[in-house]
């Protein structure tokens, strides 16, 4: 199995940190230039341009001589989104140190906890430290269902299933966010999901006019193909994707290609010319899928088994091994395809 644990529950982590930081407006008063930089940073984050967001948050922090709580909270979020654990952690600590109001303290501790649990090495000490951060966040604002969700997952990771399920049931009864409610329900039903990389639920609209969801594909082997028309290795691997679809029945294997193209017309033209007759999704219209799986490079291939567990993650093209070769052993061992 070739699965990067750093992407475990990436979708929920990214969503939580985004909820915590992007819409947040600090009670602190900043100068006009700082507010303008913060506004640019938030817009960059919302567009998925986290490098630009980092630059703007740093500029805002410089203008405030390092005393900007919102800047550090935003930096923690932006760095976390790109998997830079060290900088995310450092900035979360700085945000905790600058927090003054109950709201700020809750946000800072929750962000610190999420970085500890989601984006670092998975070990008992980090989980215990994350649990402490989430409990501190809830002690200052105990109505935050998203933070309670994080605490529940953290407890399950430590095999404290009874406590974790109790927290998650509270999320189901109080959260207005359907994403967290759905994930909480899945975890309540099967706490093991917190300890393995179960693929996050997603829905998407395809070029062919279909509505796809991972839930509806349950029982099939799913290969997610993250690619782009401007990516030479992606184009080179196209015949092998077609070969996989010839080898295995589409009743048993589903391939979903998710394009990183910005030019929709060029994407549609390429798909038509190459007769790519399996589900095609335009990433910019379904950006949450790339974020959910922590995709930062093309091509990226993710294999999900019939239970929804991620079994393999392949990034880039290996000049000595074809995509089909790198996938074949994983697919060969899946009883659903035999």
Image (cartoon, rainbow, N blue to C red):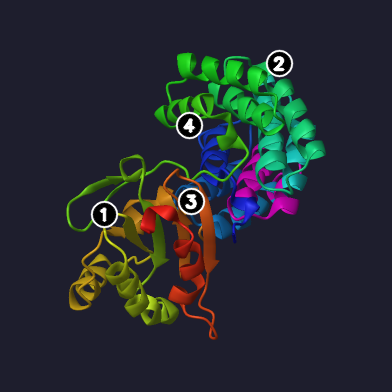
Q: Secondary structure at mark 4?
A: helix
In percent of width and height, residue 288 lies at 42, 48
Residue at (21, 58) in percent of width and height: 207
Distance from disc 2 to disc 1, alpha carbons, whole Å, reads 50 Å
Q: Residues within 10 Å of mark 3 (few under 14, many from 20)?
A: some
Q: Secondary structure at mark 3?
A: helix
Q: Nearer the viewer, mark 4 or mark 3?
A: 4
Camera sees residue 297: no
Q: Nearer the viewer, residue 93 or 299?
A: 299
Question: Which numbered circle lies on residue 183?
Answer: 4
In percent of width and height, residue 244 lies at 34, 70
Q: Secondary structure at mark 2?
A: helix
Marks 2 and 3, the one that precedes in the sequence = 2
Taking the image as shown, residue 185 lies to the left or right of residue 263, namely right
Question: Which numbered circle lies on residue 251?
Answer: 1
Distance from disc 2 to disc 3, alpha carbons, whole Å, reads 30 Å
Query: Which residue is denoted by mark 3 in the rendering?
Result: 291
The answer to whether the residues at label 4 and label 3 have Cβ atoms under 8 Å apart is no
């Amino acid at each position: 199995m070739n699965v990067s644990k750093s992407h475990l529950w990436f979708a929920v982590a990214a969503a939580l940190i985004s909820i915590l930081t992007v819409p947040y407006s600090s009670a602190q008063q900043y100068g006009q230039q700082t507010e303008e930089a913060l506004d640019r940073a938030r817009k960059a984050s919302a567009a998925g341009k986290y490098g630009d967001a980092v630059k703007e948050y740093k500029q805002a922090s410089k203008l405030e001589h390092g005393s900007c709580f919102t800047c550090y909270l935003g930096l923690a979020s932006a760095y976390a989104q790109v998997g830079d654990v060290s900088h995310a952690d450092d900035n979360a600590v700085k945000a905790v140190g600058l927090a003054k109001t109950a709201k700020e303290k809750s946000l800072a501790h929750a962000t610190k906890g999420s970085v500890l649990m989601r984006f670092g090495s998975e070990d008992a000490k980090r989980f215990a430290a994350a649990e402490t951060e989430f409990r501190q966040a809830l002690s200052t604002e105990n109505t935050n269902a998203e933070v309670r969700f994080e605490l529940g997952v953290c407890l399950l990771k430590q095999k404290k299933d009874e406590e974790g399920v109790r927290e998650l049931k509270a999320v189901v009864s109080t959260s207005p966010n359907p994403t967290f409610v759905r994930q909480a329900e899945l975890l309540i039903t099967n706490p093991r999901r917190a300890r393995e990389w179960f693929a996050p639920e997603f829905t998407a609209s395809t070029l062919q006019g279909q509505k796809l969801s991972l839930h509806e594909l349950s029982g099939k082997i799913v290969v997610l193909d993250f690619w782009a028309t401007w990516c030479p290795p992606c184009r080179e691997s196209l015949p092998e994707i077609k070969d996989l679809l010839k080898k295995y029945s589409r009743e048993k294997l589903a391939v979903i290609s998710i394009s990183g193209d910005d030019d929709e017309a060029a994407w549609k033209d390429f798909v038509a010319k190459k007769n790519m007759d399996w589900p095609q999704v335009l990433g910019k219209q379904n950006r949450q899928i790339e974020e959910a799986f922590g995709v930062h490079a093309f091509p990226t291939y993710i294999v999900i088994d019939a239970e929804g567990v991620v079994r393999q993650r392949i990034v880039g093209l290996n000049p000595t091994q074809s995509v089909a070769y790198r996938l074949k052993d994983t697919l060969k061992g899946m009883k659903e395809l035999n």
